[in-house]
Image (cartoon, helix red, strand yellow):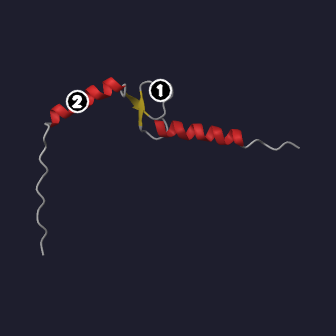
Amino acid sequence: MKRKTQPKPETIVPPDILEIAEQATSETLGIAKAGKCSVCGGETLESSSEALCWVCRRLKISAWRDAEQQMPMQE
């Protein structure tokens, strides 16, 4: 048995208009790409003072919390 070929989905909005809309939205929301994360190579935000993506920044914060909670035992 052969499968029926699926028809290609029809695009309602032309791709060039979608690209313009995405650029306008990212500018409005302040989601401009500034570079790459120094750890994983992901996208970083322009407003970020560190060269970390949001995932690596969250991991760093959680590591700090874990280190603060584990107080060394003093003799």
In x, y percent, where is residue 21?
Answer: 23, 30
Task: Give the residue at mark 1.
Answer: 48
Query: Which label sits in the foreground, 1 or 2?
Result: 2
Q: Given the image, on which type of amino acid does mark 1 rest?
A: Ser
Task: Give the residue at mark 2.
Answer: 21
- Where does the C terminus fall, quadrant-wise? top right
Secondary structure at numbered mark 1: loop
Q: How many marks?
A: 2
Q: CA distance from mark 1 to mark 2?
A: 24 Å
Front position in the image: 71 or 49: 71
Q: Given the image, on which type of amino acid does mark 2 rest?
A: Ala
Q: Earlier in the sequence, mark 1 or mark 2?
A: 2
Q: Position of 14 compared to 30: left or right?
A: left
In x, y percent, where is residue 39?
Answer: 49, 39
> Is 4 situated above or below 20?
below
In x, y percent, where is residue 73?
Answer: 82, 44
The residue located at (70%, 38%) in the rendering is 68
Displayed quadrant of residue 32: top left
